Image (cartoon, helix red, strand yellow):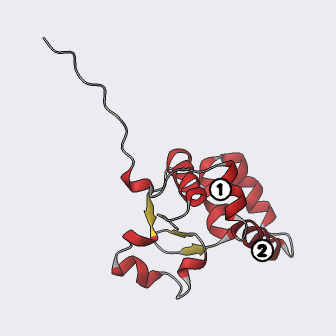
Amino acid sequence: MLVYDDDCGFCTWWARWAARNADVHIVGFTDLTDDQRARLPDDYETCAHLLTDGEVYSCGEAVERVLARSNRALADLFAELREVPGYGTLRERTYRFNADRRDLWWKLVRDDPPARTVEIPVESAPEN
């Protein structure tokens, strides 16, 4: 489950992308249950999180894990990168750099938040 800031247009765009491409369920901060919130760090609203059955991945690592779920080649690449000294620090700094500039990214790609309220239109059946 990808937990994200559902008041952010860029974050909503990313969450929808993840749901389509990485087969993850998305839950906005405003829709968290008490049990889900209990699994998150106290400062959970500072970044995205990926909750799996046994782990919680936060910030850059959450994005990395979602991207790895979207593409086998990326999964292999990230597995190799995790072995490189300093990679984790670089990943997190890159995440923070981009997260702190959501207002810029929002101008380039965005969806109207929250993702949960958008419904796919259904074609109406022809009347007889």
Q: Quadrant of the C terminus?
A: top left
Quadrant in the rendering for residue 83: bottom right
Quadrant in the rendering for residue 53: bottom left
Q: Which residue reaches farthest bottom?
A: 42
Give the x, y percent position of residue 93: 79, 74
Q: How far is disc 2 from disc 1 in space, using C-alphas?
A: 26 Å
| Vertical placement of residue 63 versus 14, above or below | below
- In depth, the one of 8 and 36 nearer the eye is 8
Quadrant in the rendering for residue 68: bottom right
Give the x, y percent position of residue 113: 48, 57
Of tags 2 and 1, the one toward the viewer is: 1
Q: Which residue reaches farthest right?
A: 85
Residue at 34%, 75% (x, y): give it: 33
Q: Which residue reaches farthest top?
A: 128
Give the x, y percent position of residue 26: 45, 59
- Mark 2 belongs to which amino acid? Gly
Residue at 77%, 74% (x, y): give it: 88
The residue indicated by pointer 2 is 88
Give the x, y percent position of residue 7: 50, 65
Residue at 44%, 58% (x, y): give it: 114
Residue at 82%, 72% (x, y): give it: 90
Residue 3 visible in the current orientation:
no
Element class at badge 2: helix
The residue indicated by pointer 1 is 106
Q: Residues within 10 Å of mark 1 (few under 14, many from 20)?
A: some
| Vertical placement of residue 91 versus 75, above or below | below
Element class at badge 1: helix
Question: Which of the marked residues, 2 or 1, is nearer the chain's N terminus?
Answer: 2
- Mark 1 belongs to which amino acid? Trp
